[in-house]
């Protein structure tokens, strides 16, 4: 599988690209050749560090359950505050299909910009004690309209192992963009 970028952008255009791609009903999947996108997004987004979690699982310092809970907490925080949730893959292909997808933690719909906005889908990931709105109103948790999902990889867009992405996560709703 060859990853074809729909466009190449400068790092400073990343926020604008996120907005534009979401408006088309897709999720931006950035191949970051600069290696700076994560740092650039750190201040305005909630970052799920998938590479670190996956390495932790491989070496036995993190369980799959702990990784799912870490992702869930990032997801819930991003939803509540209306920030983009960035899945930072670094150089790994996240094992979403086999390890992370779980309707109570990380629903498969997270990579579908329309379905993830469905209340019955996302509310399963919010625990009872977390089900409050921004003003502390119990039982009133709502996903903020500004919530978005973004994927960032630092792999080369021509890496021969990029077929792993399609094997490990749904790519149907992704728009591939190269940052250089």
Image: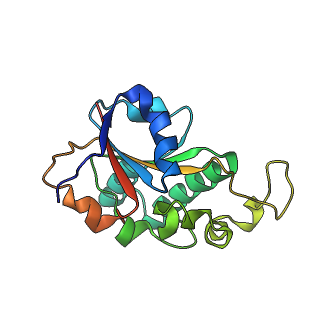
Residue plotted at (44% across, 34% down): 14
Asked if residue 24 is positioned above or below residue 104 in the image, the reply reads above
The residue nearer to you, when weighing 98 against 44, is 44
Q: Position of residue 94 (x, y in %)?
A: 34, 58
Asked which quadrant contains residue 93, the reply is: bottom left
Q: Position of residue 134 (x, y in %)?
A: 79, 48
Can residue 169 be seen here? The reply is yes
Q: Residue furthest left?
A: 160
Residue plotted at (76% across, 62% down): 131
The residue nearer to you, when weighing 34 against 28, is 28
Can residue 88 be seen here? The reply is no
Asked if residue 68 is positioned above or below residue 37 in the image, the reply reads below
Assign the N terminus to one quadrant of the image: bottom left
Q: Position of residue 140 (x, y in %)?
A: 81, 61
User: What colour-coding does the image apply?
Assistant: rainbow
Assign the C terminus to one quadrant of the image: top left
Residue plotted at (79% across, 57% down): 132
Q: Residue furthest front?
A: 24
Asked which quadrant contains residue 76, the reply is: bottom right
The residue nearer to you, when weighing 8 against 58, is 8
Asked if residue 47 is positioned above or below residue 143 in the image, the reply reads above
Residue plotted at (30% across, 59% down): 58
Q: Name the side, left or right, on which 16 lies relative to 127.
A: left
Q: Position of residue 102 (x, y in %)?
A: 50, 72
Asked if residue 75 is positioned above or below residue 115 in the image, the reply reads above
Asked which quadrant contains residue 123, the reply is: bottom right
């Amino acid at each position: 599988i060859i990853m074809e970028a729909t466009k190449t952008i400068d790092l400073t255009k990343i926020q604008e690209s996120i907005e534009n791609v979401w408006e088309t009903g897709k999720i931006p999947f950035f191949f970051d050749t600069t290696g700076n996108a994560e740092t650039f997004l750190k201040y305005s987004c909630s970052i799920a560090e998938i590479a670190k979690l996956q390495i932790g699982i491989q070496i036995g310092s993190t369980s799959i359950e702990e990784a799912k809970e870490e992702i869930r907490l990032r997801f819930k925080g991003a939803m509540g505050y209306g920030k983009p949730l960035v899945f930072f893959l670094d150089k790994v292909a996240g094992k979403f299909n086999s390890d992370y997808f779980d309707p109570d933690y990380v629903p498969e719909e997270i990579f579908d910009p329309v379905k993830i906005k469905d209340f019955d889908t996302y509310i399963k990931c919010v625990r009872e004690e977390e089900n409050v709105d921004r003003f502390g109103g119990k039982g009133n948790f709502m996903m903020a309209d500004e919530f978005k999902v973004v994927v960032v990889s630092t792999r080369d867009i021509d890496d021969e192992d990029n077929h792993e992405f399609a094997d490990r996560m749904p790519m149907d709703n992704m728009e591939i963009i190269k940052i250089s």
